[in-house]
Amino acid sequence: MAKQINDKIDELKTGVDWFYSDDFKLEDASEKYRALTNLAKEIEKDLVEMKNEINVIEEDFSKD
Amino acid sequence: MNNQELQVYSVSDFQAVCNQILDTAFTGVVVEGEVASFKVNQGKFIFFDLKDKTSSVGCFMMKYALRFPLEDGMRVRVRATPKLTNWGKFSLTVQSVMPVGEGDLKKSFELLKKKLTEEGLFDAAKKRPLPPVIQKIGVISSTQAAGYADFCKILNERWGGLEVQVAHTQVQGMVAADQIMRALKYMNERGEVDVIAVIRGGGSADDLAVFNDEALVRAIAASKIPVITGIGHEIDTSLCDMAADVVASTPSNAAQMLTRDREEVIGQINGDVLRVRNLFNSKVDDILRENRSLVARAKDAVVVKITTAESEISNFMKILEQLDPEKVLQRGYALIRGERKVGSVVNITTSDEIIDAKIEKIVQRS
């Protein structure tokens, strides 16, 4: 899940960069902005909900 | 009881029975005392006496098992098995030895630090940064330790979605170093984690002494997987810290260094989106402003064209006015129609009259 989160954050960064780049086109901007806000909400939801998985290894390290 | 009732042993049997009794009585014993007559034979056998105010016992150990530098006068704790040698001498066969007491621990620490520094074990060039994306964390700690609980608490508060594999080991005492080394080996052999965190909360110098164990320090330096240590409090520095790739001041700090803060990330994301919205609005405003400017310029151009055309038309009108025959007549000229010869009747038009007149004389102008 965290990998997906990182991918989503990267996607968001790319989306933000587009607005600052020479590729910016007004006719595409509204749709891209809408997609960006949806992605931001999705990331926030994931970040709040995701939990760590902590497992203790069964191996007995007290033995040689 | 007379001699006939007592068991008669050969010397070897007696020595063997004594050792059996010692083995049964002491499966392992920890003895604390002061080192005396420390010496290394043939580069691999170590002999020293362990003594206190009234007694002394000989100790033997293999050099490879010595993990802390020793000197005469140091106070140490040895884990050993007692033994009666073939020559009838009682001695301790030492499995591990660890200095005790702040002064001797410090002395041992400085000796080993000097040795390992000279070897280049702590060179900054050998340090690796933490991976940019951490998905799997290996933790080596005691799961009962407060430091481990702090680590997990901060880790869970800050970030989620991580896979954490925990190797439960002792983190103090004479067996801890070997257990931690086995856990390091286990994780390195599997290669499943992105980083290994060696965690231990605060404690006394004796409690933390395991993290100055030479073999453990070397194992951390040799780890294929980057190692972060979070051992003790801010003021504690161990040789394991110096050998690790990244040092955190405490277990909590290690958790902070391994994770991003989800609240901070959410804030950044919302900030980014807000900045994009402002940028978007600003770009729309710019384009609208530019459009208005273009329309205004076009309007101005049209007005100029119209004004120019009007001016030209006005000039033409003036010229045309000048050419209007009526205007010429109004200036006093007359229009004559008919055959111009003596006796013929011509029609004369002025601005206000039309006259028929007979030509009586024609004179050529010179």
Image (cartoon, helix red, strand yellow):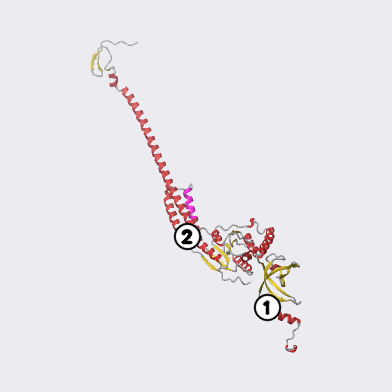
Badge number at residue B192: none
Q: Main secondary structure of the magenta part?
A: helix
Q: Which residue is mark 1?
A: B23
Q: Amino acid at mark 1?
A: Asp
Q: Nearer the viewer, residue B330 or A64?
A: A64
Q: Chain of mark 2?
A: A
Relative to A49, B128 lies left or right: right
Numbered disc total: 2
Which segment is the magenta one? A10-20
* Image location (x, y in percent) of residue B197: 58, 63
User: In the figure, is residue B353 to the left or right of B129?
Assistant: left
Mark 1 lies on a secondary structure that is helix
Going by the image, does B44 lie left or right of B349? Answer: right
Query: Foreground: B4 or B260?
Result: B4
Quadrant for the C terminus of chain B, please: top left
Residue at the spot 68% in from the left edge and 78% down from the top edge: B23
Report the residue at 34% width, 27% height from top: B314
Q: Quadrant of residue B133?
A: bottom right
Residue contact at pointers 2 and 1, CB within 8 angstroms: no
Q: Is residue A53 magenta?
A: no
> x%, y% of residue B364?
32, 11
Q: Is residue B161 visible?
A: no
Q: Which mark is residue A47?
A: 2
Determine the residue positioned at 39% across, 39% down.
Answer: B295
- Residue at the front extreme? B53
